[in-house]
Image: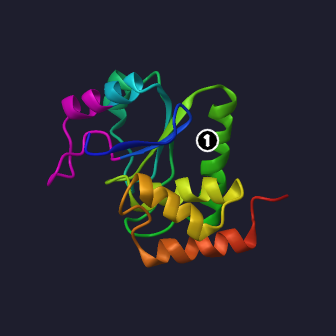
Amino acid sequence: MIRFYWLEPGILAGCSRPGARPGRHTAGDEEVATDLAELRGQGIGALLSLTESPLPAETLARHGHDLDILHLPVPDFHPPSPEQLGLALRFIDEHRGRRQAVAVHCLAGQGRTGSVLAAWMIRDGLAPAAAIARLRGICPGAVEAAAQVRALEEWGRARSWLV
């Protein structure tokens, strides 16, 4: 696995796409299986996938059947929509309530992944700039696109998670 980091140990992590390797965006069954085993070894029970294409269904059937997986496709270097952020945070909250750690992944584990992790901190009271700074202290390069930063600032202003 290229990247794995805890935002909140035992609760919420960010990572690169299972099976991704430096310089190669496609992965074979064995690489995906190895990375899924690594995630389980870290205590991960659920996986939130933000890549445009889901992980291969046949590989997940063989090697990821015990993980709860939600796929929310977001184009690379784009922010998740407010609706996707809401779905992502509900998924994280649901698993937190079950005491299952969640790993969020995109391709590199920085931009789209960082957007969801920052949104989680914003919802819990941090200002967008503070959430991004905290995240970048853990994962330099997180929330990598200006559009992602702007979307988090707007999401924080809108406070759309409040009912």
- Magenta stretch, residue numbers: 16-35
Residue 130 appears left or right of 109? right
* Magenta stretch contains residue 1: no
The residue lying at 43 percent from left, 23 percent from top is 65
| Rendering coords of residue 107 (x, y %) | 33, 53
Q: Quadrant of residue 144?
A: bottom left
Residue 35 on image: x %, y %: 29, 32
Q: Position of residue 72 (x, y in %)?
A: 51, 52
Is 46 situated left or right of 119 in this image? left
Q: Nearer the viewer, residue 125 or 18?
A: 125
Q: Residue 114 in the image: x percent, y percent?
A: 47, 57
- Left or right of 163? Residue 7 is left
In the rendered image, the vertical position of residue 154 relative to residue 69, given as above or below? below
The answer to whether residue 78 is above or below residue 104 is: below
Residue 18 within the magenta-colored segment of the rendering:
yes
Q: Label 1 belongs to which residue?
A: 92
Residue flagged by tag 1: what amino acid is it?
A: Ile
Check disc 1 and report its element: helix, strand or loop.
helix
Q: To which quarter of the image does residue 151 belong?
A: bottom right
Name the residue: 33% across, 39% down. Answer: 56
Q: Report the side of 50 relative to 95 (left or right).
A: left
* Prevailing secondary structure class for the magenta stretch in the rendered image: loop
